[in-house]
């Protein structure tokens, strides 16, 4: 390195250091008050050094605002569920709640309860399906041939009688039901039982009918449901788990009680758009028709 340049650098650094120390002493330590005026005068000299301190304040007085009073305004405070729809949490006090069986959830007591719409479905019929054809009577053949035996068959649903029916011949050209066999059996009560076998093309099976009572298909269940607002709208279902939809709601058959003639149905729909879908169970029964009472006539007094 050049010793001449190093010398000048050393002298410059020394001068800068001396200038910094001198400025520090004059400004902050008050080494020469006559030369440097202090940045902040003493307390007693501030009024003279700063004339603005002795001048009156500018602007107007700030208006007085009424102070909040807990005692005065306590009755005006709104509960959270009244102030903000859907806000069920109060930071300071608990909310009184009660169980709402209609919505199957706890709701605040102060909330206005929105009544749920009717279930909308009614039970019309439930049970094992009954075969409509029954054997009313039979007449022995005059010729002695079993093929000439005649039968009287009734359709209990349409209240129609088919007379002089014979084996291997349809009941009617428009009815695809044909007698194919006849026999006499001993019933459980010891009395004879006439049994006629029909070939039913509609059902696609052979059905044995007798002259005792209508035949029930124990392997099948018929459930007939109808809309309460429009009874002509019906649904025919046969087992648990069967589903159908009506007016935006989904219905599912949950239970079938043949002894009590009831069907339990689950309805799933959206009663409140803010809370989503909800499910409700209802056990439907067949409505009992109540006949009006016959007015009694008062007997004339003698």
Image: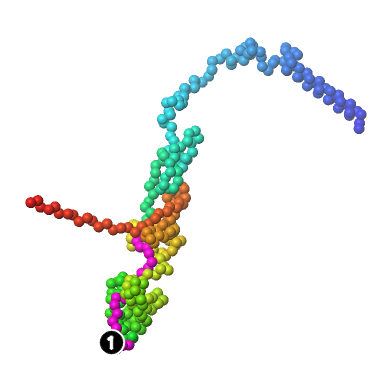
Q: Please state the horizontal and vertical placement of residue 159, each as a whole percent of the image.
A: 28, 72
Give the residue displayed 17% in from the left and 54% down from the top. Answer: 296
Magenta-highlighted residues: 122-145
Q: Dot 1: within a 10 Å radius of its alpha carbon, few (fewer than 14), some, or many (20 or more) residues?
A: few
Answer left or right for 193 relative to 280: left
Residue 181 lies in magenta, yes or no? no
Q: In the displayed image of the protein, which residue is found farthest to the bottom? A: 143
Q: Please state the horizontal and vertical placement of residue 181, each as a whole percent of the image.
A: 37, 81
Residue 126 lies in magenta, yes or no? yes
Q: In the displayed image of the protein, which residue is found farthest to the front? A: 190
Give the residue displayed 33% in from the left and 76% down from the top. Answer: 192
Q: Quadrant of the N terminus?
A: top right
Q: Please state the horizontal and vertical placement of residue 174, each as a whole percent of the image.
A: 33, 79
Q: Please state the horizontal and vertical placement of residue 210, each as a whole percent of the image.
A: 34, 75
When the figure is inspected, residue 281 is found, relative to residue 97, above or below; the finding is: below
| Among the 4 quarters of the image, the one containing residue 257 | bottom left
Residue identifier under label 1: 142
Give the residue displayed 39% in from the left and 70% down from the top. Answer: 217
Residue 178 at least partly seen: no
């Amino acid at each position: 390195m050049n010793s001449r340049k190093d010398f000048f650098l050393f002298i410059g650094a020394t001068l800068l250091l001396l200038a910094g120390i001198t400025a520090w002493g004059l400004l902050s330590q008050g080494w020469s008050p006559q030369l440097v005026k202090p940045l902040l005068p003493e307390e007693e000299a501030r009024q003279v050094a700063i004339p603005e301190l002795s001048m009156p304040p500018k602007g107007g007085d700030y208006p007085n605002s009424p102070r909040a009073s807990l005692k005065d305004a306590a009755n005006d405070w709104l509960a959270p569920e009244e102030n903000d729809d859907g806000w069920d949490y109060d930071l300071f006090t608990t909310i009184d709640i009660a169980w709402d069986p209609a919505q199957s959830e706890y709701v605040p007591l102060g909330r206005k309860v929105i009544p749920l719409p009717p279930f909308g479905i009614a039970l019309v019929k439930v049970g094992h399906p009954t075969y409509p054809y029954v054997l009313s009577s039979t007449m022995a053949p005059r010729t002695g041939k079993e093929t000439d035996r005649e039968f009287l068959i009734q359709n209990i649903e349409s209240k129609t009688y088919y007379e002089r029916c014979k084996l291997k011949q349809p009941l009617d050209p428009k009815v695809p039901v044909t007698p194919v066999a006849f026999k006499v059996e001993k019933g459980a009560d010891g009395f004879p039982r006439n049994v006629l076998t029909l070939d039913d093309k509609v059902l696609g099976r052979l059905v044995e009918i007798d002259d005792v009572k209508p035949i029930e298909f124990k392997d099948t269940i018929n459930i007939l449901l109808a809309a309460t607002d429009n009874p002509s709208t019906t649904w025919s279902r046969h087992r648990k788990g069967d589903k159908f939809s009506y007016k935006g709601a989904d219905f599912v058959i949950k239970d079938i009680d043949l002894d009590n003639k009831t069907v339990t149905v689950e309805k799933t729909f959206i009663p409140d758009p803010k809370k989503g879908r909800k499910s409700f169970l209802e056990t439907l029964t067949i409505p009992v028709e109540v006949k009006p009472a016959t007015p009694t006539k008062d007997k004339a007094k003698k």
